[in-house]
Amino acid sequence: MLAPPPEGTFDNEDGNVPLKIPQKDGSPENVPLLEQEASSMDSNNSNKGKILAMVIGAVPVLKKMIFTRDAPLYFFTDSCIILGKAMIPCILLALGGNLVDGPGPGSSRIGVRTLVAIIIGRLILVPPAGLGIVTLADKLGFLPADDKMFRFVLLLQHSMPTSVLSGAVANLRGYGKEAAASLFWVHIFAVFSMAGWIILYLNILF
C-alpha cells in the first residue's frame, strides 16, 4: 500500500495541497517579455549587424556582390527586404497587444508627471528646436535654394510624435506596457499639436 506523504494524510480538510516547489509570481504583468541577458545579447547582435552593413556598403567589391540585383548573393538582400516589409506591422501588432487592457496600467506605472513631461518635451519643445536648426542650416547654405517643400519636410519631421520603433526597443527591455501607454497619449495629443505647427510652417514658408 501507499504510505501517506510526510506533510500529513491523504485527506486534506482545508483543500490546500502542500507543495514542495514554491510557486513564483508568473503573472504577465511582472514577467518581462525577454530576460535581461537575452535583451543585451540581442542589442550586441544588432550593433554587430550595423557595423557589418557599414563595412559591406563601404567596400565597392562587397557591395556589388550583395546589393546589386544581378549579384550572386542578392538573394540574401532580397530576403532582408521581405522581412523588413513585415517589421512595421509586427511592431504595431505588439504595440496593440500591450494596449489590450487600455493605457491605464502603463500610465499608472509611468506616472502623470512623467507622461506630461514626455508630451510637452516631444510635441512642444522639440519643434521650435527643429525650426531653429533648419533656419540656421538655411542661412549657412546647407539646404537647396528655393526648395520650400524640402524645408517643410525637415520642419515637419520635428513635429511628428515618437516613432513606434521606440515601443519595440522598450519591449525588448521588458517595458512594453509603459512604452505603449506613452506612445498612445503622445499620438493622441499630436493630432492637435501637429495641426498648429503645420499652420505655422505654411505661414513661414509660403
Image (cartoon, grey):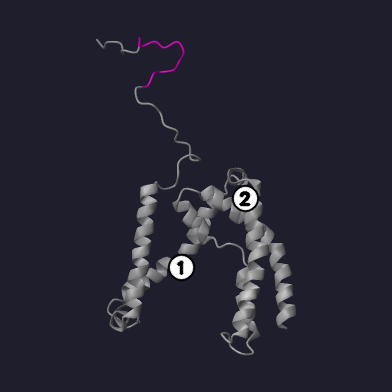
Image spot of residue 47 (x, y percent): 37, 63
Nearer-the-camera pick, 47 or 189:
47
- How would you classify the magenta stretch by its main secondary structure? loop
> How far apart are labels 1 and 2 at the CA level?
33 Å
For badge 1, the amino acid type reads Lys
Q: Magenta segment: does it hold 17? A: yes
Label 2 sits on a secondary structure element that is helix
Q: Residue furthest bottom?
A: 145
Q: Could you say which quadrant of the image residue 26 lies in?
A: top left
Upstream in the sequence, badge 1 or badge 2? 1
Q: Are marks 1 and 2 in contact (CB under 8 Å)?
A: no
Q: Magenta segment: does it hold 139? A: no
For image coordinates 61% across by 90% down, the residue present is 145
Q: Provide the residue designation for mark 1.
A: 85
Q: Provide the residue designation for mark 2.
A: 114
The segment highlighted magenta reads: 8-19
